[in-house]
C-alpha cells in the first residue's frame, strides 16, 4: 500500500477542528513536524467509532514535534520533543503550507 | 473548539501518584469490553467515542470504569444488542437480589 | 453521625446505613454482563477466563524482557523490532495489540502518555495506575515533562533529550531503560527486579541496589 510521506518528510498537521471522534490531539493542530517512521496502514478510527468499517486503510505515521515549537516559552531543553501517531489524512507537506 | 477529553497541554495541578487495587466489578467491566471487541460487537473506537459523548460533567465526575460501563451500555442500546426495557428490568432485578442478600449499599 | 448514647432500647431502622442506594454503574456491570451471557454473546466461562487473563499480566513481565535485553544484544534488537514476538520468546503472551519498545540512551529519555484517553500496554504490563489515566498526567506530560518527572522524583539533566510519546493510535509503548551502572554482575532475575512499572512508563529510572 502506498504512503504519501517518507521518513524525514517535513509535515504540518491540518489546522481544522471538527467535532466527532478524532485521534489527532488538539495541541498538535497546525504544528510542523518531521515523519519519524511509517507504522503501517490501519482502518480509520473516525469511521470505526460510528460503527463503519473504516476502510480503505490509511497510512499511520510517527511524527516528531519540537517542544519549543509547540509551546511558547517552553522551559525544558531545546531538543525536547513529542512524538505522536498521526493518520495520513491529517498531514500536509510543509512546503505547500508555507506558500 | 476543544473537546473535553482532549486534554494534552491543558493546565492542571500536581501529578498525585495515587493508585488503587481494581475492584472485581471494574475487572468485570474491562473483561466485558475485551469480549465484546473480540466478538466484534463493538470496537474500542466506539467505546472511546461513547465516553467522549458522555460530556464534560460526566467525564469529570465518573470514575474510569464508570465511564466505560456507561459507554458500553449506550453502545449496546444503540446497536440493539439489548433493549432499554431489558436493561431496566435487569437493573431492578439485580438490585432486588443484592438487597435480599443483604449486600451493603455504596452511597449516593 | 449520631452522638453515641447508652442503649437500653432497640434502635429504629437506620436508613442511612441500610438503604443507601447501590452504585448505578456497579449494577450496570452486573446487569450488562448477565444479559450478554443470556443472549449468547459470550459465556460465563469466557468472562471468568478473561478476568483471569487480566490478572495474569503484571509489570514483572515487562521487566523480564528488559533484563534479557540488557544481557543479550541480539535479544535487544528483537525486542526493539517487535515487543510482542520478543515476549512470546520468553513465554509471555502480550496479546494482539502491537507494542513497541523505546530505547533510552545516555542522551535520550523516553516518556509514555495517552493524552486522549489512557492507552497503555495492558497486554504486557496489566492495568495502568490511576495517575496515568487522570487529568494532571495526561495534560502536563506533553507540555512540561521535566516538571512532571521532577515532581515524581525523576529529574532529567538538561543535556538529555526528553521525548514524550503520545499513544494516539493502535500502537502501545514501553520504555527500554538504561541499565544502571554497577549491575553487570547481577543475574537476569536480579536485573528484572530493578525494573519497576514506572521505569517502563518512563517516570522512574532503574536504581542499582544499595550496597
Image: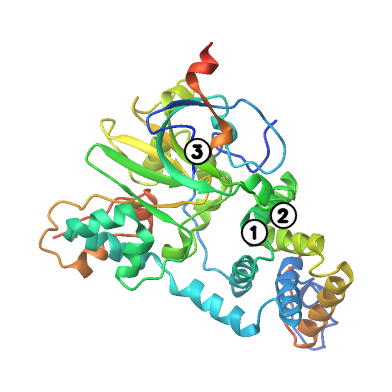
At label 3, counting other C-alpha atoms closer than 10 Å, the crowd grade (few under 14, some 14-19, many 20 or more) is: many
**Label 1, label 2: how far apart the Cα atoms are:** 8 Å
**CB-based contact (under 8 Å), mark 3 and mark 1:** no
Question: Is there one chain holding both mark 2 and mark 3?
Answer: no
Residue holding disc 1: B43
Return the x and y of residue C195 as percentages of the image width and height. 29, 59
Image side of residue C76 versus residue A55, left or right: left
Q: Chain of mark 1?
A: B
**Label 2, label 3: how far apart the Cα atoms are:** 32 Å
| Residue closer to the observer: A29 or C31 | A29
Report whether residue B10 is seen.
no
Residue holding disc 2: A51
Judged from the image, the secondary structure of the residue bearing numbered disc 2 is: loop
Question: Is there one chain holding both mark 1 and mark 2?
Answer: no
Residue in the picture at 54% in, 17% down: A97
Residue holding disc 3: C140
Image side of residue B72 versus residue B30, left or right: right
Amino acid at each position: 500500500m502506498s504512503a504519501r510521506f517518507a521518513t524525514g518528510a517535513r509535515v504540518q498537521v491540518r489546522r481544522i477542528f471538527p467535532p466527532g471522534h478524532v485521534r489527532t490531539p488538539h495541541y498538535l493542530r497546525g504544528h510542523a513536524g518531521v515523519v519519524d517512521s511509517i507504522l503501517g496502514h490501519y482502518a480509520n478510527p473516525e469511521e470505526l467509532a460510528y460503527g463503519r468499517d473504516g476502510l480503505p486503510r490509511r497510512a499511520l505515521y510517527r511524527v516528531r514535534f519540537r517542544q519549543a515549537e509547540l509551546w511558547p516559552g517552553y522551559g525544558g531543553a531545546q531538543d525536547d520533543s513529542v512524538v505522536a501517531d498521526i493518520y495520513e489524512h491529517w498531514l500536509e507537506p510543509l512546503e505547500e503550507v508555507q506558500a | 473548539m476543544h473537546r473535553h477529553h482532549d486534554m494534552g497541554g491543558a493546565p492542571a495541578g500536581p501529578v498525585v501518584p495515587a493508585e488503587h487495587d481494581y475492584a472485581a466489578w471494574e475487572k468485570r467491566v474491562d473483561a466485558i469490553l475485551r469480549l465484546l471487541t473480540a466478538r466484534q460487537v463493538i470496537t474500542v473506537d466506539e467505546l472511546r467515542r461513547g465516553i467522549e459523548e458522555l460530556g464534560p460533567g460526566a467525564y469529570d465526575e465518573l470514575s474510569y470504569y464508570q465511564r466505560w460501563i456507561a459507554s458500553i451500555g449506550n453502545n449496546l442500546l444503540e446497536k440493539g444488542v439489548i433493549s432499554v426495557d431489558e436493561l431496566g428490568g435487569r437493573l431492578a432485578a439485580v438490585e432486588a437480589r443484592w438487597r435480599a442478600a443483604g449486600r451493603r449499599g455504596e452511597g449516593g | 453521625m449520631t452522638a453515641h448514647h447508652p442503649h437500653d432500647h432497640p434502635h429504629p431502622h437506620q436508613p442511612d446505613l441500610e438503604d443507601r442506594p447501590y452504585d448505578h454503574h456497579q449494577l450496570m456491570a452486573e446487569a450488562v454482563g448477565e444479559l450478554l451471557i443470556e443472549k449468547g454473546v459470550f459465556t460465563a466461562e469466557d468472562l471468568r477466563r478473561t478476568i483471569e487473563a487480566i490478572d495474569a499480566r503484571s509489570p514483572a513481565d515487562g521487566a523480564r524482557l528488559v533484563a534479557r535485553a540488557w544481557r543479550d544484544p541480539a535479544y535487544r534488537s528483537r525486542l526493539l523490532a517487535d515487543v510482542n514476538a520478543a515476549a512470546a520468546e520468553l513465554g509471555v503472551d502480550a496479546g494482539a495489540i502491537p507494542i513497541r519498545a523505546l530505547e533510552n540512551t545516555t542522551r535520550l529519555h523516553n516518556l509514555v502518555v495517552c493524552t486522549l484517553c489512557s492507552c497503555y500496554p495492558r497486554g504486557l504490563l496489566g492495568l495502568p495506575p490511576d495517575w496515568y489515566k487522570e487529568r494532571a498526567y495526561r495534560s502536563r506530560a506533553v507540555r512540561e515533562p521535566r516538571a512532571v518527572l521532577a515532581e515524581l522524583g525523576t529529574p532529567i539533566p538538561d543535556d538529555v533529550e526528553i521525548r514524550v510519546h503520545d499513544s494516539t493510535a493502535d500502537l502501545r509503548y514501553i520504555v527500554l531503560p538504561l541499565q544502571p551502572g554497577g549491575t553487570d554482575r547481577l543475574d537476569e532475575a536480579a536485573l528484572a527486579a530493578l525494573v519497576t512499572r514506572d521505569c517502563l512508563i518512563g517516570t522512574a529510572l532503574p536504581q542499582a541496589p544499595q550496597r
